């Protein structure tokens, strides 16, 4: 099976873990051991920001970022429904009400026009998602936020290596949240990072991740146990060094797949623009004028032929029982249509040129 994504772990990561296991420490009570501290410095440099705060999951990154920018009970947060549920979970965990808005059908990212329509006196933040690894159009969202005094917390979970106006994704946000889950462009197994330019936000994030403590047993505020371990950070340091090579291979695979699939007019292929470059976390095509049954049949056939294609996300969050029952129903036509038509194909660094050809030609044959 050609997996949709596969961690690229080598001897360097294994040696880094063994070094921590032999010499310690395994973790740090305030979440700031030597490996974590080094990883944060490296990640801040990569992300083009002043601060990076490492945590134990991408969901912890989202939750703590929302709290750190001031989201509280009774606030509203605008976000897309076409995303992994963790984006909305974090909003609810922060005590706020998620306000789901529709997407741009060409990019699958949140529509700035729809964001502006849904700003109210209760709105406190906007959460654009860099879906599939393609940056949301953050500049107009930043302008809306500045006009209304709102925070922007960018869900960059899939965007390691994506750029916006020549800079890393996330630099226009008050805080950007990255996942280091096993499927991502780089991984620490489980893990996350929040990046920010703000000294105040970074300081709050460091308190939040370790029970509100600035010193041991001296809690200053409500906090959580969101620390990253030294083992995770050791893996992350190595993975971050390898990221440029990973991205280069993903891009080459994506370009080859585009060349093959451009032979059919039945698919909407992923695009880049001069100002927004893809991280190619997922190569997502859309079955033009197709329905859910046809899309699902194609997925089934691809898997039978050893291609681990997937459809992300067939259940938009606003249609999930908890969110529908707790926050009311919404009608998001572009989101609901895309959920029935998208197919994601493997382009990770472990996919060979021969396998890319096989994926492309197999899909063409099925169409």
Image: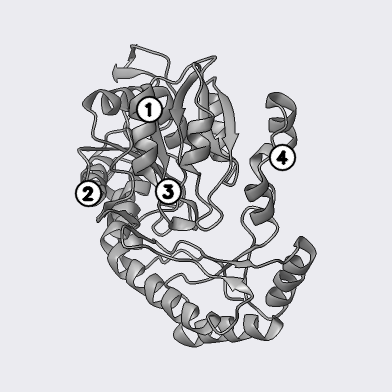
Q: Name the residue under label 3.
A: 136
From the viewer's perspective, is residue 273 above or below residue 319?
Answer: below
Color theme of the render: one colour
For mark 2, does the 10 Å Cα neighbourhood hold few (<14), some (14 to 19), or many (20 or more) residues? some
**Foreground disc of the pair 3, 2:** 3
Q: Mark 1 points at which residue?
A: 151
In the rendered image, the quadrant that contains the C terminus is: bottom right
Q: In whole angstroms, how far apart are the C-alphas of marks 3 and 2?
A: 24 Å
> Is residue 139 shown to the viewer in this render?
yes
Q: Distance between the residues labelled 3 and 4?
A: 22 Å
SS at mark 2?
helix
Report how far apart the C-alphas of labels 4 and 1 lie in the structure.
26 Å
Q: In this view, does 5 lie above or below 100?
A: below
At 77% from the left and 71% from the top, the residue drawn is 297
Disc 3 residue crowd, few under 14, some 14–19, many 20+, Cα 10 Å = many
Give the quadrant of the N terminus: bottom right
Mark 3 or mark 4, which is nearer to you?
Answer: 3
Q: Residue 279 carries which label?
A: none
Disc 1 versus disc 3: distance between alpha carbons? 15 Å
Residue on which the image places disc 4: 319
- Which residue is label 2 attached to? 42
Pointer 4: residues within 10 angstroms few (<14), some, or many (20+)? some
């Amino acid at each position: 099976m050609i997996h949709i994504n596969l961690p690229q772990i080598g001897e360097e990561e294994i040696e880094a873990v063994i070094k921590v296991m032999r010499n310690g420490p395994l973790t740090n009570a305030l979440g700031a051991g030597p490996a974590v501290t080094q990883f944060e410095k490296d990640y801040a440099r990569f992300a083009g920001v002043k601060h990076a705060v490492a945590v134990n999951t991408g969901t912890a990154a989202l939750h703590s970022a929302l709290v750190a920018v001031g989201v509280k009970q009774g606030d509203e947060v605008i976000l897309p429904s076409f995303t992994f549920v963790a984006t909305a979970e974090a909003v609810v965990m922060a005590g706020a009400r998620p306000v789901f808005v529709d997407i741009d059908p060409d990019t699958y990212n949140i529509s700035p026009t729809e964001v502006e329509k849904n700003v109210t006196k209760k709105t406190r933040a906007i959460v654009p998602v860099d879906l599939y690894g393609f940056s949301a159009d953050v500049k107009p969202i930043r302008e809306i936020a500045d006009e209304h005094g709102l925070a922007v917390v960018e869900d960059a979970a899939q965007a390691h290596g994506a750029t916006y106006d020549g800079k890393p994704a996330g630099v226009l946000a008050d805080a950007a949240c990255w996942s280091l889950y096993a499927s991502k462009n780089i991984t620490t197994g489980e893990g996350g990072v929040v990046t920010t330019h703000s000294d105040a936000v970074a300081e709050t994030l460091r308190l939040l991740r370790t029970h509100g403590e600035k010193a041991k047993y001296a809690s200053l505020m409500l906090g959580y146990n969101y620390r990253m371990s030294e083992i995770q950070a050791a893996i992350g340091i190595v993975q971050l060094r390898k990221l440029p090579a990973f991205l280069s291979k993903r891009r080459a695979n994506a370009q080859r797949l585009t060349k093959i699939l451009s032979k059919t007019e039945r698919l909407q292929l992923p695009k880049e623009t001069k100002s927004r470059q893809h991280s190619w976390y997922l190569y997502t095509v859309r079955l033009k004028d197709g329905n859910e049954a046809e899309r699902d049949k194609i997925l089934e056939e691809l898997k039978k032929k050893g291609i681990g294609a997937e459809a992300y996300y067939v259940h938009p969050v606003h249609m999930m029982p908890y969110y529908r029952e707790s926050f009311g129903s919404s009608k998001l036509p572009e989101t609901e249509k895309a959920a029935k038509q998208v197919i994601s194909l493997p382009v990770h660094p472990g996919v060979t040129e021969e396998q890319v050809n096989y994926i492309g030609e197999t899909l063409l044959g099925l169409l």
